[in-house]
Image: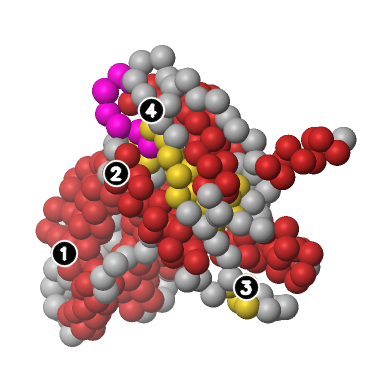
Amino acid sequence: MLNYQTLFICDVATGVVYAGAMVLLALHHPQLRAHRWFMAAALIGLLRNALLGTLGVLPLVLSILLPSLCNIISFFCIYMGFRWAIVRRPLQSRLWPTVLAVELLTFSTLFLSGFSHTFAFSITPIFALCILSIQVLRRNQDPEMRTVVRAGITVLVAHLTLIAIRTPMVLFRYDVNTSGQFRPARQDPFWLATLACMMFVSACFFVVYLWFFEREMNRALRLQVRTDARTGVLNVRAMEDEAEREVLRAARKRTALSVLAIDIDFFKQVNDTHGHAAGDIALKKVAEQLLSQIRGGDVLARTGGEEFTILLPETGLTAAQEIAERLRSSIAALDIVTEAAVVHLTISVGITMHLGNGDAWPLMHRRADVALYRAKRAGRNCVAVCMEKNWAPTPLPGVVEIRAER
């Protein structure tokens, strides 16, 4: 037979294990913001459970009011954790935190004034936060997260269902009245059974937290493999994967696809004159400037020492030329502040397009390089185009001389 004391001890003990595990993971991986919110939810939930066990021992302010406030704040942390896991940005408005603060203040005021049925004011924001969390999870577009997102939605729905079952019982059978007296439900079998179900759902929440943590770690590792450590943009391997995908899509849907090959002019002089530390800063600043000038669906990668490649999906030649010229002029006007000096750089840009069926990424990449060589041969700090299928790459005069000397 179910016993409240046993359930309480088990609830607090498992809560300590859950919260402890979350804290350890958060300390080792502080960069995962979603997990930090989940950790906060676990810790606040543990405090709530511990305070609920003092019912009948401590004043109602500590055994009912404070746990109710903790419960609301805990679900706000859950919502923020799911938001960071899916949307990956903070709240754009202070509306929801303001509404939450007003709700907490209203509930506390009504409770302390002895108003009956205050439970309704504490459970309403939890309903709302669960629904908001479900809406956030449904915005997921990452196939790798699909399964864990479904698990999160299932747990939230289960929690909402249990709340809907328990709420009438609290309101009409075990409510705090105006005199401050409370009739505990510790002997009610149905109450204890639903409490046990709530404990099971809490365990499921913990599993979902860990599952999201595992997905986030995998994502971070994939990002590390695909990212250039010096500039933060994609590396060669990632660009090849993206390019193959975009070429296939352009051929299948018969949409335009342009490529920009970019080289920083005389970049070696920066390293020779100001040192490699200044060169690294300059390289990163150029990458940041390029990234700020392209669209969200465009792909930027560092594909050489001072070379970058940009994929422009659904972009024709005229638009690609306009983008290339905008990039060229923005870099030329950029003041790059390093510890040694303020550096000014220019770039040369080569442009090509996907020329229809049979035009693979290696051919496009070579044409973009040919166009880049043409820009360099024209004096650098300019834009050139190569659209010929049967092109004949002409080496730079300097390259010919070096080979002749050898």
Element on which disc 2 rests? helix
Mark 3: secondary structure: strand
Q: Position of residue 209 (x, y in %)?
A: 47, 46
Instruction: Tell me which label, 2 or 3, sits earlier in the chain.
Output: 2
Residue type at numbered disc 3: Val
Q: For mark 4, what is the residue?
A: 354
Instruction: Identify the residue position indicated by label 1 in the image.
Output: 120
Task: Determine the CA span between mark 1 and mark 3.
Answer: 63 Å
Dot 4 or dot 1, earlier in sequence: 1
Tell which circle, 2 or 1, labels the residue nearer the N-terminal end: 1
Question: Eyeballing the image, is 365 above or below 129?
Answer: above
* Disc 3 target residue: 343
Residue type at tag 4:
His
Q: With respect to residue 97, does 291 lie above or below?
A: above
The amino acid beneath tag 1 is Ala
- From the viewer's perspective, is the residue at label 1 or at label 3 nearer? 3
Q: Nearer the viewer, mark 2 or mark 3?
A: 2
In which quarter of the view is residue 406 placed?
A: top right
Whole-angstrom CA distance, mark 3 to mark 4, is: 35 Å
The answer to whether the residues at label 2 and label 3 have Cβ atoms under 8 Å apart is no
Three-letter amino acid code of the residue under disc 2: Thr
The residue lying at 63 percent from left, 65 percent from top is: 282
Q: Tell me which label, 2 or 4, sits earlier in the chain.
A: 2
**Residue for badge 2:** 318
